[in-house]
Image (cartoon, rainbow, N blue to C red):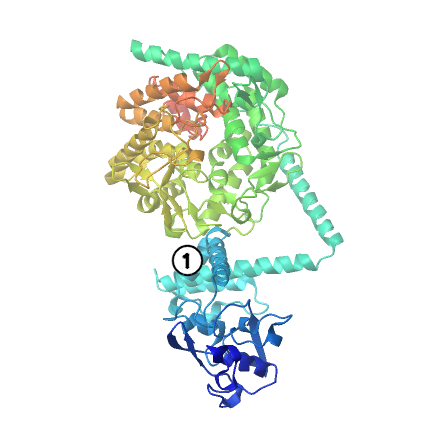
Amino acid sequence: MENLTNCDEGLQPAVCLACLFAKGAAPARRAGGEPLPGGRPAAQTRALGGLDAQEPAPQPLTAGGSEVWLLSGSAPGPWTDCQPEAATTGAMPVGGLLPLFSSPGGGGLGGSLGGGLSGSRKGSGPVAFRLTEKFVLLLVFSAFITLCFGAIFFLPDSSKLLSGVLFHSNPALQPAAEHKPGPGARSEDAAEGRVRHREEGVPGDPGAVVEDNLARIRENHERALREAKETLQKLPEEIQRDILLEKEKVAQDHLRDKELFGGLPQVDFLPPIGVENREPADATIREKRAKIKEMMNHAWNNYKRYAWGLNELKPISKEGHSSSLFGNIKGATIVDALDTLFIMGMKTEFQEAKSWIKKYLDFNVNAEVSVFEVNIRFVGGLLSAYYLSGEEIFRKKAVELGVKLLPAFHTPSGIPWALLNMKSGIGRNWPWASGGSSILAEFGTLHLEFMHLSHLSGNPIFAEKVMNIRTVLNKLEKPEGLYPNYLNPSSGQWGQHHVSVGGLGDSFYEYLLKAWLMSDKTDIEAKKMYFDAVRAIETHLIRKSSGGLTYIAEWKGGLLEHKMGHLTCFAGGMFALGADGAPETLAQHYLELGAEIARTCHESYNRTFMKLGPEAFRFDGGVEAIATRQNEKYYILRPEVIETYMYMWRLTHDPKYRTWAWEAVEALENHCRVNGGYSGLRDVYFASESYDDVQQSFFLAETLKYLYLIFSDDDLLPLEHWVFNTEAHPFPILRDEKKEIEVKEK
């Protein structure tokens, strides 16, 4: 130990010589003092704690004649015990020197990670890191991994990166060189190459599919880079001028749309079929239906008392509530409830609502609205009110609002924006949607209303807009036959590959089926799209739990999330409604599938304290049909489960559906009814009610209407003559005039 402390030349630690060598003061020597070739320090025999081990001396990185060292704090050991006093005064101890990068000899950081630490003790030389250094390295590495996975799963088009990069690393599946656009190549050339490759490739060849996908991704990214570069090269004045030109173009398009409607053509109103409100023969059913009508009275009268003319009611606060979905448009509950008032025979209330609409319903507002919500609630409500009553004011207002929504379609692809300023006609998408995409359930839920707008206005422009949406969709490749929830209106390409039959996707599938039914089963394209989609849904999304419950999961880039939303529960009724149009061998299957979904959704209600269903429920972690997250336990008076009960009752007359519907009535009365109306609940599993203080307009439009129809005879709005939009507004089937007259005479 004395030799170690005195640093005699013969036993001087290699690091001391290395330090001197680094300063140009001494040549490097082997152990024992023999000079080393090239000046590299030798390994030093360690004799501490009675252990003899060969330790490699620290080695500098030699790159172009220079040496790079990593300086760290001093620590006891063979490299620090023999430092000259002068070397430690006013400077970092020499023993703290660690090579920053690996030298050709294999030392340094790279060498230590690659093998220097293998089989060595903790702290046994320069290749080992102290605890703080290990922690910093681990932190940096963890952050890098987190960033990579975040980019893969959450950036727009991440699913394309997953499918095209991570899961297809075989060189044979990588894009061929001839399909890579060279300098100055046009996107049109790349597109032609993809088409040509598809034509020449072997059907079902995975390499061709991957190559096509990667080429498309590359093309989109290059186009985005070119556009960004062009924008950055412009002066601020040029950018401002472009914005003004775009606004002027939108205004001209808006004016052109208005000029198309100088006036509405004369329409001969024919009395509707199936609106006679006969009392059920069964006294018990009569009593239950009367109770549901009383619930409608309670909801309507409190809205009238505390929030008349506003969009919705706060039944606890007893004041009005206005959602930003409607901008400055007022009267959502009035318009949404029109047909329910008519069907239930509440004639006085219907006339009051009509008078308000005639005087106060105004669409000339400088505000941004949800195209989807305004369409299904306002356009849908006005159209159904016209078809039921024949009042011209409803047709006029419906077409007027339809014209106001047309600028939403002024996009490169014709896929409409989600949000639209009603005055300027400028649209945009939800900022949270994948890469500025439009949402499948929103742009896919315009078809029924816009077809009827063309029918009542005599102008085909509405029908043309929604038929173009279908054209765009049919040109796109569907992953596994499924429709992703996001579609970019500028590029006309899919966003993230998230698929759901619940929120963001639900009513698109509903409208495919109902477009076929509403066309008097002549829209064969819609029928094919619907059944193709259902087959893909059944293959990839529908699963059965260990407890025997059938549910519809969500698909995210090829991975299933075993969650089913309350919104998804409409699908039971949809499958049953479409069974009649399925191939003969599958008709009974789809009816049974609808019944299984209805049972699952009933279980989601039955397994809560309130006997009302949560917003979403899961099938993982040992639970089935139960919400496991606090933000999924609320109930906002939603109608989807009741909707499925209504279709299943009409199509099967199984009495359990009336029983389940009455259970829902009792739960609504026990837990949602308050003095000021009906309120949603924050937690359906909690024994004490916690109210959200909103009486949604769809509670009057959908929930109460479906309940009323369940306890009515089938000849009230018969399904062979009426199709309900996604807000439960009934539209008549569009038949040619001759056939329509024959049906009415019958």
The percent coordinates of residue 420 (x first, y second) are 60, 37
Q: Amino acid at mark 1?
A: Ser
> Relative to 1, is 664 above or below?
above
- Residue closest to the eye, 457 or 580: 580
User: Which quadrant of the structure image shows residue 617?
Assistant: top left
Task: Find numbered disc 1 in the image and state the secondary structure of the residue it sits on.
Answer: helix
> Relative to 82, is 361 above or below?
above
Residue shown at 53%/41% (left/top)?
465
- Residue closest to the eye, 315 or 23: 23
- Residue closest to the eye, 10 or 270: 10
Residue 16 seen: yes
The percent coordinates of residue 27 (x first, y second) are 56, 87
In the displayed orientation, state which residue is furthest to the front.
2
Q: Residues within 10 Å of mark 1 (few under 14, many from 20)?
A: some
Total marks placed: 1
- Residue closest to the eye, 76 or 40: 76
Residue shown at 64%/33% (left/top)?
367
> Relative to 207, is 27 above or below?
below
User: Which quadrant of the structure image shows residue 325?
Assistant: top right
Position of the C terminus, as image quadrant, is top left
Q: Is residue 198 left or right of residue 586?
A: right
The percent coordinates of residue 87 (x first, y second) are 60, 75
Residue 745 seen: no
Q: Is residue 618 left or right of residue 80?
A: left
Q: Is residue 611 left or right of residue 35?
A: left
Residue that label 1 marks: 163
The percent coordinates of residue 629 (x first, y second) are 41, 36
